[in-house]
Structure formats: C-alpha cells, structure tokens
Image (cartoon, coloured by chain):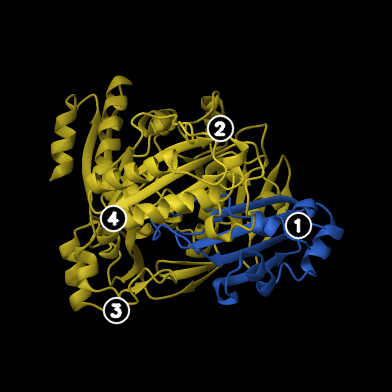
Chain colours: A blue, B yellow
Amino acid sequence: MLLDETARVIRSKNAGPFMLTIDIFFDSDDGYARAKNSHLLKPSGVADAYGLPVEAIKGVWWDDRVRAAKVSMQRWSSSADPFCGDMFGAHLHVPLSRSKL
Amino acid sequence: MNDPEFRILSFVNHIPPTAGIEEHIERAFSWGVDAVVAQGTGSDWGPFWLGSGRQVESDVARNVLPYVRAAHRHGVPFVFSFGIAGGNVHLDKCLADFQRVCAADGLDLEVAVVRSELRPEDLAERVRTGPPVLPAADDPSLAPQLQPDDALAATRLVALIGPEPVQEALRAGADGVITGRALDIGLFMAPAMNAGIPIAVAAHAAKLLECGGLALEPGDSAHCMWARIDRNSVEIRSPNPSARPTVASLVSHGFYERSHPYTEDNPGGTLDLSDVTYTELEDDGIRGIGARWIPAPYTVLVEGARHVGFRSISVLGVRDPALLAQARAWSDAAERQTRARYAQEFASDRAELTTRIFGLDGVLGDLERETAVTGHEAAVIVDVVADSQELADQIGYYAFIRLFIGPYPGRKTTAGNAAAPYMPVIIPVGEVFRFGVYHLLPLDDPCGLFPFVLQRFGTTTTREDKVLSHAAR
C-alpha cells in the first residue's frame, strides 16, 4: 500500500531555506501503526525514496497523541541553486507519498 | 488563576483578512485583550525580495487597519513586523502605506519603529573583531565560518531581532511597535514578558499564536486567534465561531515549518515542547502546559542576499505526440547545442542553463523517476542565469530557436516544433540572488544594534514624504 493511500494529510514545507520538513497525519490507529513499522518511514527508507544519502535525512519523529509523523531532510536544491524548482518546498512530498509502506 | 495574566489577539499581517473580521476582533476584545500582535516577515519567499528590495504584493496597511482601529479604541498596543524580507526599503514602503491608511481613517498614532537592517561594513567589522559567526544551516553553499568578505558581498542584510528590542520599544508606551525583519515568536513574547510571564510560557504561547488562525480547526491564517497566558500555561480560543482549537490542531501546529517537532533554537535559548500537555476547556478552549526553555548563548540569525546574476526564461508548448515521446532528448539536444555555441561563456561560469519540462520533470528535476511524458501535452521552460541580462537573453534566444526549429527523429512539424504563448519570446526576469549569509551572530546586548525611533502616523503627519525623510535618518 502506498503512503498516499494511508495518510490523511501529507504536507511538505521549508523549515528555513535549507531544510525540508514533511508532516504526515493518519486517521486510523491501523494506518499509523503500519506507517510506524514500515521501512519507508525510517531515515534509510526516506533516503531511498528520494535517492539522497542517508546523512541528508535529519530525522523521523512520531507523535502518538495525534497519529503524526515528521520527516526532515536537508534540501537537495535550495535557494542556493539558481534553478531551484520549489522555493516554498510545498510540493516535494511525492517521492515519499507515492512509495510503498 | 495565577497572577500575572496577559491576553493577546494574533493574526498574520501580510495575509488579507476575510469579510466579517471586525466582528471576530470585537468578540476577542469582549474577552479582554492586552496586545494585538501580528508577524509580516519571513524568508519563505526566498532571497529575491531581500536582494532586489522589491515587496511581495500585499496590502499590509489595509490588512492591519481593523486591528489598529480596535487596539487604538481600547487603548492597548499593537506589535507588527512589516515587509516580508524586512529590510529598510521594505519597511519604509509599508510605513508609507500605513501613514496613508491611518491619515485617511482619521487615526493619529505614535509608533516605536525598530529597524533590523545591518550595513555590510558593520557586519564585516563584527566578523573581523568578534567571536566566530557560524552558519545556521548545514548547507555547502554557506561559509563554514563567516568571513568579512562574505558580509561585504551581501546586497542587503537583515537580523531576526529577538523579543528584547521589542520589549524596549514597548516600554516607550507608544500606541504600537512596528519592526522590520524579526523573529516571529519574539513579537508575541515581548509584551507577555514585559507583563511578567516567564520566557518558556511566553515562547510556547507565541509558537501557537505566530500564524494567527492557522493553528485552529479548520486552519486559516486569514483569521485571528486569542490567547490568555499566565505564569504556567496558555489558553487558546477562536474569536471566529466557525473555527476552534483542538488538541490535534495545536500539537500539529507545533510541528509546522520547523525541522524538529518539539524543540526550536531561538536567540538566547531553546524552546522545548516535548513535555507539553493540552486539555480541553469549556466552550471550545484548550489549555497547554509544560513548556521548557533551555538557556543558550545569545545569537541572532542574520540573512544576507547575494547577487548571482540575471535570469531569462522562455516557454514552449508541446502537443504533438511524436515530440512528446522524445521531449527530454529534444530538450537535451537544444541544451547541448546552446552550450557549444556559447562555450566560452559557460566555461568561464558566466552563464548557466537548464530546461524544465512541465509534464515530466518540472517539479522534481533530477529526482524525478518518470522518464517519459505520460500526458497529452507538456511545456518546456528554458531557464538561463548569466552575468548580464543581455547575455541571459541571447543564450535564452538561441536555446529557444534550437527547440523551435531543431530536427528530431521522425519530425513532420518542419515549420515549427512547438507553440510559443508569450511575446517577448524571451522573458527577462531580472536579478537572481541566493542567501550568501544565513549565519548566527553572537550578541552581548540583544538591543544595542536595534534601537527604536518614535514616529507619528496619521492625521498630524499629513505629508507622506515627512514620514519617509524621518525614516531615512
């Protein structure tokens, strides 16, 4: 199952100009548990999904209270790149959301 | 109830309010408001605005008017940061608009204005003589330790001032405080800390309040939010009856636009929300308790825009299936031919070129895993950055021509390969910047560089140029 099919909200945004952070919210305990146990939502799984070195993944955190995950990574193309394709970092979730849990 | 207590009405001043906002403001004042606070600066929009001195289109003065009227009528101060990038040029544009709006509305206000732009030579001097100035982000484009030349190379520099200069400005007792670039949460912390609220609770409240109604359910920054803060806790309510805070909305807002879910480094300390708990109150209120503040050496983030060149773009539309099937190869060929034609300019780093294909790799670029266009049409955007606008235009034109007339296998479209929707076919976009400075400047005195100046706005200052000349001093 794709992460996209499990999560209710997957929001991507800059956390400062050089960091990207993706917040993922789940509706059900089942979906949350499946995501939390997945390889995808470990630093190495995120690195694979984006084709980035694992050192670029700053962390994956979980909040059981609101069934949420947070994934933060160094931007591979930031404002330092004159051809940066997404200044707000608002649409960089797809490599993750379209990956299998 | 613990003593002291402080109540804040928050909104975001660069986001236009929705109709009916006056009613929500009045509801908040019926609960009691001690300060009206709204942020209007940020680096989200990138270094272009800071470097170019241009203002993101937003009628800030009109946005704040209903809040300013209410604050003035009730005799409580307002605290705003203005101008997105928040340099002097941006602040002055907003202040001139604010003057016009106040005068037209019959308001007469005294405002403590705090500027946060730094002169490159002043930062260079501090870098030369002071402690190391280290990057605030782990990025290879940033100097591992700022050098005087990095400061001097900046077109414009701003500091994210902390709560302290705002606290000082508030003590002047004016109708309000307006700053340039500032730490969002500092604007909210300042009046609360002046009222005796401990820094940890003030910072926690500020974190929830900084984006106005975005922390509510449903979230919308065009709406306002209200908080009552005491020595231990913060209580959140929505003046708009069609939204309300929930435990989930507040916890998830704590995540928003920050790399770590629970901790955030700020001037003079780290805000730690990992032990915070939220409880539901009667009538749709939520109380949060348990924030901690771990003191650290005082630094302010300095942002500096560095000019890197001039951009030109060209847009071509592709609808023919034969060309769509090989769109990337065709674009790559045009890029190669353009690099060959301008070999010297590319070899000497005077120019850079890329082609994005919307319909294939426009969003993700090299990270895209799809290898062919799957839809029925696509757009190619030629993107050139060069050391002069003229060179960027020339290179863009050559790339456009190669795309427009260049042969490709199986071509039938011999009169022209693509649709050109725009004239001029090469669009000069203008200057390009990057953040050359994104570093933490240690400060012994959080206020010394950022004094306030009292200025009048509204009916007693009838000429706009008077405000501007005052501001320029």
- Can residue B313 be seen here? yes
Out of B453 and B443, give the one closest to the viewer.
B443
Label 2 or label 4, whichever comes before in sequence order: 2
SS class, disc 4: loop
Mark 3: which amino acid? Answer: Pro
Q: Quadrant of the N terminus of chain A?
A: bottom right
Out of B363 and B122, give the one closest to the viewer.
B363
SS class, disc 3: loop
Q: Chain of mark 1?
A: A
Mark 2: which amino acid? Answer: Ser
Mark 1: which amino acid? Answer: Leu
SS class, disc 2: helix
Label 2 or label 3, whichever comes before in sequence order: 2
What residue sits 36% from the left and 33% below the top? B425
What residue sits 75% from the left and 60% below the top? A65
- CA gap between label 2 and label 1 equals 45 Å
Quadrant in the picture for residue B325: top right
- Which marked residue is nearer to the observer: mark 4 or mark 1? 4
Quadrant in the picture for residue B139: bottom left
- CA gap between label 4 and label 1 equals 45 Å
Instruction: Say left or right for B333 vs A73.
Output: left
Report the residue marked by disc 3: B132
- Which marked residue is nearer to the observer: mark 2 or mark 1? 1
Report the residue marked by disc 1: A3
Contact between marks 2 and 3 (CB within 8 A): the answer is no
